[in-house]
Structures are given as C-alpha cells and as structure tokens.
Image (spheres, rainbow, N blue to C red):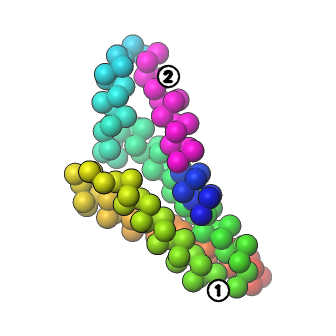
C-alpha cells in the first residue's frame, strides 16, 4: 500500500515542484502556474505525467503486495486495489468530472491487479 499510495503522492509532490520551476523559468506568473496545476484535464502535461507515474506506482504496489504475501495474492491485490480507489475518491472530492474519476478508478484497479498477477506468476514460478 505504501508503494501505491505513498509512491503516487511522493511522485506527484516532486512533479509539482519540477513543473512549477520549469513553468516559472519560462516566464509564467504564479497565478498561471497555479492555474495549470489546478487543471485536471489529461491534456495538461502535469496531469498526464502525474497520472503515468501514479499508474506505475499502482502496478508496483500490486506486484510488491503479491511478492510479500506469497499466498492468496489475488485477494490481497483486490484489497489493495479497493483501498487505492477509496483513497483516490477521497482526494477527488470536489472534482467536477465523475467520468474522469471513474475512469481513473477503473485504471487503478486494472493496473494493481496486473501487478498482482505478475507477482503471483513469479511466486508460482
């Protein structure tokens, strides 16, 4: 769980710093940087990059979960996916795009379970 949720939060934090510095160096005002950071459309480079890194963290979370438990991997992977979705929903409170939130939730479940399946395959190996 730490890899999935913690990794996603840490990479998002670091990416926000990197993007803010790059945009500020390009001459954008603080207001413009804040507006870009607040734009959650996937056409926004920050949002897209953070989504990609978050997806990688979710995959690794499922993989590491399966490798650690070494039994009932699918069950524990499903629990991790459910927790990940609930945390995602909690952080999305106030977001005006239910379709985007639902799509990211589905993506999260699929990616965590793919990582879990990969870890399980290595365990059974």
Q: Position of residue 36 (x, y in %)?
A: 33, 32
Q: Position of residue 125 (x, y in %)?
A: 77, 82
Left of 99 or right of it: where is 24?
right
Disc 1: CA contacts within 10 A as few (<14), some (14-19) or many (>=20): few
- List the residue tagged with mark 1: 72
Q: Magenta stretch containing residue 65, yes or no?
A: no
Q: Residue at x 26, y 51 (%)?
A: 94
| Count of marks, rendered view | 2
Q: Residue at x 41, y 59 (%)?
A: 88
- List the residue tagged with mark 2: 21
Report the residue that reaches farthest toward the top.
27
Residue 30 drawn above or below residue 76:
above
Q: Position of residue 53 (x, y in %)?
A: 53, 49
Q: Residue at x 64, y 86 (%)?
A: 72
Q: Are marks 2 and 1 in contact (CB under 8 Å)?
A: no
Tell me the SS state at disc 2: helix
Left of 38 or right of it: where is 115?
right
For the stretch drawn in magenta, the main secondary structure is helix
Answer whether residue 24 is visible to the viewer in this image: yes
Earlier residue among tags 2 and 1: 2
Where on the picture, by quarter, is residue 97? bottom left
| Stretch of the chain drawn in magenta | 9-25
């Amino acid at each position: 769980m730490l890899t999935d949720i913690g990794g996603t939060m840490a990479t998002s934090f670091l990416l926000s710093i990197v993007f803010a510095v790059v945009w500020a160096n390009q001459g954008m005002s603080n207001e413009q940087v804040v507006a870009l950071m607040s734009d959650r459309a996937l056409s926004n480079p920050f949002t897209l990059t953070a989504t990609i890194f978050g997806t990688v963290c979710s995959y690794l979370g499922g993989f590491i979960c399966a490798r650690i438990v070494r039994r009932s991997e699918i069950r524990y992977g499903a629990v991790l996916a459910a927790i990940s979705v609930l945390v995602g929903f909690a952080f999305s409170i106030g977001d005006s795009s239910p379709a985007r939130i639902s799509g990211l939730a589905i993506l999260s479940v699929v990616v965590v379970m793919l990582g879990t399946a990969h870890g399980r395959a290595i365990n059974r190996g």
